[in-house]
Amino acid sequence: MLEFMEGSHAVAEIVKRCRPQVISAYPITPQTHIVEDLAQMVANCEIDAEYITVESEFSALSACLGASAAGSRVYSATTSQGLALMFEVCFNAAGMRQPIVMTIANRSLGAPLSIWNDQQDSISLRDSGWLQFYAQDNQETVDLHMIAYKVCEDHDILLPAFVCFDGFILSHTYEPVSLPMQEEADAYLPAFNPYQRLDAAAPLSFGMYATPEYYTEFRYEINQAQYRAKEAFVRAGREFGEQFGRDYSGLVEGYRLDDADIALVAMGSICGTAKDAIDEMRAAGRKVGLLNIRVFRPFPGPEIADALKGVSKVAVLDKNISLGSGGAVGTEVKAALQGSGISVYDYIIALGGRDVRKRDIAAVVDLAEKGEGDMFYGLRTEVL
Amino acid sequence: MAEVEKGCELFSAGHRACGGCGPALAARLLLKATGENVIISAATGCMEVFSTPYPETAWGVPWIHSLFENCAAVASGIEASLKRQGRKEKVVCIGGDGATLDIGVLCISGAFERGHDITYICYDNEAYMNTGIQRSGATPYGASTTTSPAGKCSRGNPLPKKDMPRILAAHGAPYVATASIAYPNDFVQKVERAINTPGPCYIQVHAPCCTGWGFESGETLNMAKLAIETGLWVNYEMVDGEVVKAKKVRRRPVEEYLQKQKRFRHLFKPARQDDVIAQIQAIADANAERFGIDIKKKESSE
């Protein structure tokens, strides 16, 4: 049954159905509605969890780390500056192999201060060891949370994950969403079964320091777990499709790519606008398609190369900038397509909440056709 | 995550602390007090490094180290998780003075304000020893460290120790105490009281560092004892914010303590710094006044 609700509320509803035992979060726009809803659910005894009202995002994730190590399924949510404050804990949680799921209501990073959407925050943590999933709409946001817990808690993976959805554009937007019944959710996501836990009956030391004789091997094993997460995601996404009828077995998702000459590549809610723009361009006889990158970590390089076989040009829409280099997604797509003969153009777009309309997507396609790229799109030169 | 081998001590010998390490003794006494039914949340620092080089661990109880500044936040999560699971292990944080008085204050303040049932032990060796003897908020006035060196225009650390026990008592902590490794039974009893008191409790245990302070490794306990006997360290207990008990002493002049340590050598050589010594004596006098530790005639020690 479809219900009409705000994106943040839909996230809270699905988190409730994932039965976290400890929730720890700190309020930050535009994540607040999620944690407010969860706090109310705890207050109403709708959810049987400890809710820790921490004094900072740094402590929010630290508390999740401790609770996870003690054997509880945990949940947090944040964005932007909050995620930046968690930077140190993010690397640590991945290194300690704790299967924490955290929603990121994507927002830009200051300075200048901006509460509006782009994907700079989570993309800046791309080297941290967290899995990163990006949702196109609120239904996908909901579904990816269940898939995330399943993948993270797999004893062959044991990594934390960001479920990313665009702040305001999705978090504050009302859309029809289908939520599972609790029994259906339980059937898909069984109770948490920790691989190891802090336990006086079987003492273990967690988080020891490693000398040069061991450090590299720890990092290697985390990296291997990232690669194994590809298969685990495909499996969990297929199982999800079998149970709920919405298939997520693709790390990437193509739209009208089959005979496309130009392909857009994007992540998140911008894909919805791009699909509408593509329909219009197709109607006008232009062979344009889209590749949505759903899983950014582990990076699906071979899957991207395979999906884009046959196109001659690729236009990457990057809602972030690695200052002094280029868009992070574009850089990695270029690496994935190296030697393919495909021309890849990168466009820095939609930073700090700037709207992207269908005509902007068409304009990007025009630029790619002309071979003009690796640029900020829509720069207001008059205010420079 | 290494398997723990159990010996007769819960904190095993064979770790990599310096000979004469005060904090190592504090760890051993801590686990004697807690017994097996405990989970330790440790901060980065000397103790973490000397006790857990992968794949070896000295800890015979469950132990977790995440970062330098977050052991109290990690403990908050552990405590919440145990509560949710109906488990009864005690949760104890352990951090050095840098982790506790400086970089970890945010997380500790949050954990104490929220009232988690945890005990926080600060082993106070009065500087950042793990990184090479830099000053912390717990470094005493006048001590020369690598970042508060004595020199032509410096007479060592220009600031007094931060009063962390009072800060945490002000958070409403039901039990706050100071202790010293020179008085092991007292420390063990205070740990037992803290872990059995519901809510967040704090103990700051004075644990001299022979390497960082500059004294012979066989003198650690004597140095801890002299700190008490000069009034520069006071062992006391606070219940619900009120000082209820303080160890009384027949005080000796602070010089006897200062002269034995390289970190205070600049106060005596090449020229005696009478004014600084007098200021340090004034700190001891103020401690004696505040806690009423001076033994008067015909009054016995506690």
Image: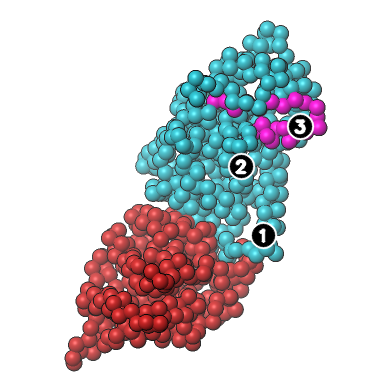
Chain colours: A cyan, B red
Q: Disc count in the image?
A: 3
**Callout 3 touching callout 2 (CB < 8 Å):** no
Q: Position of residue A93 (x, y in %)?
A: 56, 52
Type of residue at label 1?
Answer: Tyr
Q: CA distance from mark 1 to mark 3?
A: 32 Å
Residue at the extreme top of the image, as rendered: A284
Q: From what the image shows, is residue B158 above or below residue A223?
A: below
Residue A108 is at least partly visible in this image: yes
Q: CA distance from mark 3 to mark 2?
A: 20 Å
Q: Are marks 3 and 2 on the same chain?
A: yes
Type of residue at label 2?
Answer: Arg
Q: Which mark is residue A337?
A: 3
Residue A243 is at least partly visible in this image: no
Is A342 contained in the magenta span? yes
Using the image as rendered, state which of residue B282 and residue B88 is in the foreground: B282
Q: Residue at x 39, y 73 (%)?
A: B143
Q: From what the image shows, is residue A12 above or below residue B298?
A: above
Q: Residue at x 36, y 42 (%)?
A: A43
Subunit of mark 1? A
Q: Residue at x 61, y 54 (%)?
A: A95
What's drawn in magenta, residue-wise?
A: A328-350
User: Badge 2: few (under 14), some or many (20 or more) residues near its Cα, within 10 Å?
Assistant: some
User: Which quarter of the picture shows residue B244?
Assistant: bottom left
The residue that label 1 is drawn on is A215
